Image (cartoon, rainbow, N blue to C red):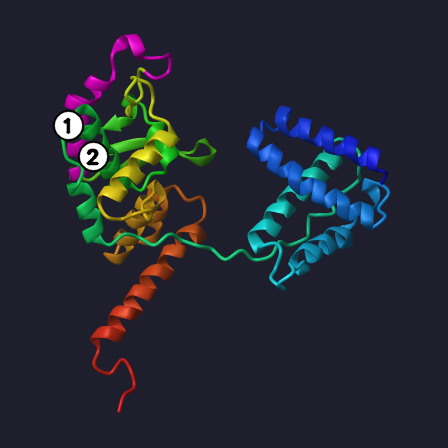
Amino acid sequence: MSDDALTRLLREHDIWLGVERGVADNTRRAYGRDLRRYARFLSESRVTGPTEIGEHTVAAYVDDMTAARDDDGRPRFSPATVARALVAVRSFHRFCLAEGHAQGDPTEDVGAPRVPQGVPKALALEEVERLLDGIEGDEPSAIRDRAIVETLYATGVRISELVGLDLDALDLESGFLRVLGKGNRERMVPVGSTARTALADYLDRGRPGLAPARFARRGDIDAVFLNARGGRLTRQGCWMIIRRHGRRAGLADRLTPHVLRHSCATHMLDRGADLRVVQELLGHARISTTQVYTRITADRLRAAYDAAHPRARAGP
């Protein structure tokens, strides 16, 4: 494949991502970086056209990245980086297939390296209580912040789902939120009494102080959570609120909105909640995603057993 031909295809792929697939600019730039590395590999392999790229070519590229080492002998690319690069390569070849530049997709049966699944450590219940007790004050922003933290921990919703809530999605009398999750899948999420009280207080005393009509933009007037200018609170704004209160509670940089989501799931499973119930609560499409939490609770069970049972460990 000539450099000019490949450059042209890569440029067309980038346009295709933006126009046909609606991919965000940051993601397109990341794909571009990965595909430039792939293009260098193809050039070095003397591949002359997309029709010459087979499964063995793509597999060799994955092996090449996996085997790469730095000057100290450490892997140059992590499994997550290799897996991400393969996603970009798959996208490129699916573009080539869709646009008639190739007759097949050589990435179809190429597997990515296994990426260790990391789960943030859940907060202890005492840490959650310290966090919530530390959000003091009667000003609108403090009342809002209490409602945000209570809701994130009580429901396990994602930060994007929280800031996307509109007023008509709240049914505090019945104790449910209507949440729009990934893939535009809608689900009903129960809200505990403490979070319901915090939300009701926010709607009664906090939100009116943050929502002067002259500042409200179209689409923000129905938002549940508002910023100081009366607009819808953004993900970044919510993230900063959580981190600020985490530092005040002595949690340093451990606390993020996602940690509250993990804490909700872990604490429920610790107390006997059914895995399918937690799957529905979190909006996981696959039960395997939720099963990550069972390993956490199993570890806790093992540790508690080893510490408490007199014959759990062999001894003299």
| Residue 49 located within the stretch drawn in magenta | no
Above or below: residue 14 compared with residue 129: above
> Residue 46 got which mark?
none
Residue 95 picture location, percent across and down: 71, 34
User: Pointers 1 and 2 in contact (CB under 8 A)?
Assistant: yes
Residue 182 picture location, percent across and down: 44, 36
Q: For the point 41% across and 44% down, which residue is it?
A: 284
Q: Callout 2 environment at 10 Å: few (<14), some (14 to 19), or many (20+)?
A: many
Residue 206 picture location, percent across and down: 18, 23
Query: Which amino acid lies under the numbered mark 1 shown in the image of this protein?
Result: Asp
Q: CA distance from mark 1 to mark 2?
A: 10 Å
| Residue 217 located within the stretch drawn in magenta | yes
Please provide the residue range marked out in magenta.
194-220
Badge 2 element: helix
Q: Which residue is mark 1?
A: 201
Residue 187 visible within the image: no
Q: For the point 29% across and 17% down, which residue is it?
A: 230
Query: Which amino acid lies under the numbered mark 2 shown in the image of this protein?
Result: Arg
Residue 212 picture location, percent across and down: 25, 12
Q: Foreground: 255 or 179?
A: 255
Q: Which residue is mark 2?
A: 146
Q: Foreground: 193 or 244?
A: 244
